[in-house]
Amino acid sequence: MPYVTEVDLAHPTEDSADAWWRDAVVYQVYPRSFADSDGDGVGDLAGIRDKLGYLELLGVDAIWLSPVMRSPMADHGYDVADPRDIDPLFGDLADFDALVAEAHEREIRVTMDLVPNHTSDQHAWFAEALAASPGSPARARYYFRDGRGEGGTEPPNNWRSMFGGPAWTRVTEPDGSLGQWYLHLFASEQPDLNWDNPEVSDDLARTLRFWLDRGIDGFRIDVAHGLAKPDQLPDMAHNDESELLDSAEGDPRFDQDGVHEIHRNIRKVLDEYPGSVAVGEVWVDDDERFGDYVRPDELHLAFNFRLVQADFDATAIREAIDHSIRAVGRVGATPTWTLSNHDVDREVTRYGGGAVGRDRARAMALVKLALPGVAFLYNGSELGLPNADLPDEALRDPMWERSGHTERGRDACRIPLPWEGTEPPFGFTDGKSAPWLPIPTDWSGLTVESQLEDLDSTLTLYRSALELRAKHPEFSGAEIEWYGSPSECLAFRRAGGVICALNASAEPISLPPGTLVLASAPLIDGKLAPNAAAWLV
Ligand code: NOJ
């Protein structure tokens, strides 16, 4: 008996004309690594603008820009010194406006990252806090606390930073004495804001309006599950290093009930701008608690990372899909799908690397793009890029230093994109300066140029898939129905009619009945190859 997953995508408060994002394909641009227009080896806004034609050709509905605001770049932009200005490394506000305008002309929406959990230690507020005394209003915008033990030499609690080491750093007081400690869930250059302080929420509202008034279509909310901290900041039950960005149940650093009021306030501002959208970064495993973030008066969308965490295994993938749909179905919200981003290994590498990893990543692209809801696509996935092997001296992620060189961090998935030519920098930059991370010399077969006209390339597969998904009514409908399938395989049907079959077994399998419209690999005697997926109608 086929199993039907019930889900209702109608969100009571959303006018469907404004909910353009409900079945969108959103392309994540990691600006440092996308395209460099000024030859300094780091990507920038003008570089992105130059490539809008490419994104139009690819067929994406929207882009999400990782942070481009003023930042000393201790965490490559996720340490914001001024949330209402563009960092000179990326350009200026005029470049930003030009990018948004041209994207809109091409019918591509633009969304951007916001980082409300913390600021940079170079933010004016933090400088004020350091210059002020314990107990002052300037310190109350952050978490400053006295240390524990004799002379306050121990951190105020046992929380660990997500990048390694303690989540507290001790400051020198204005009089030169060793003083209080401040909280930072990430690097010490990223002090956590105190969201109980109304100045903090007022400032975010100002930032939201600042960008919305400039025509931005929405935001990705960084660490959306971590903004509220529990009263008294109790110790963690376990003092283990958590896996990067993942949060365990009961971890006092994340998913506190108080976070929902913050999201309601964000939503109120966005509701003043019909058609705008907020998607939260929510590393919360429990389906019900996850769904709470996308209740009708909270965020529109939340990243569900279950597909990122699933191995290339039919049971694990099916469970990830079911959980993702159920988590939001309860509150009538839209599911989201993502295979990778700038924080996790690229899917080609996660699925085993080499030709097998690439085949599996291609197959999973078809699975993801057949599902109901919003599909996020990390720049370079469409080229089938793997992680790169980097020598120690090339590593730039703060995790590398903070972990005492035990965690290599995320640089391997952030390599600049190869656009053209046969050797690095493959058109990413003009060659005056080296790219900020070295591009592997053997990526000439992965460039946009080499894949554009190649009918078998991953880029062509993505272009075909996006075109089919956009144009055909078979890709409509909120429900999926699971079909019976051979072991280690899965097949589902969208209400609109498209069927997606995935073969994660070692043998070719028969396709479900229907007309084949796209396959991630050539059929073998009419059968679906191992590590491949197909669409049928
Ligand atoms: C999540 C972001 O995706 C990651 O890149 C960043 O390091 C942390 N939040 C801290 O802002």
Image: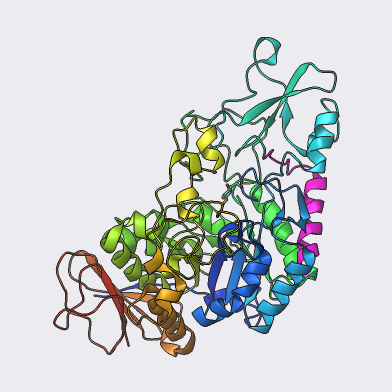
Residue 408 point in image, percent of width and height = 45, 40
Could you tell whether 455 is left or right of 183 in the image? Answer: left
Predominant SS of the magenta segment: helix
Residue 222 point in image, percent of width and height = 62, 53
Q: In which quadrant of the rendered view does residue 205 lie?
A: bottom right
191 within the magenta span: yes
Q: In which quadrant of the rendered view does residue 431 lie?
A: bottom right
Residue 302 point in image, percent of width and height = 55, 61
Could you tell whether 429 is left or right of 517 in the image? Answer: right
Q: Indicate the quadrant containing the C terminus: top left, top right, bottom left or bottom right.
A: bottom left
**Region of the chain picked out in magenta, as a range:** 190-212
Task: Point out the residue furthest to the front here.
Answer: 432
Q: Residue at x 55, y 71 (%)?
A: 26
Q: Residue at x 80, y 70 (%)?
A: 213
Is residue 402 or residue 165 the one in the foreground?
A: 402
Residue 534 point in image, percent of width and height = 29, 78
Could you tell whether 382 is left or right of 314 in the image? Answer: right
User: In the rendered image of this protein, does residue 224 appear above or below residue 407?
Assistant: below
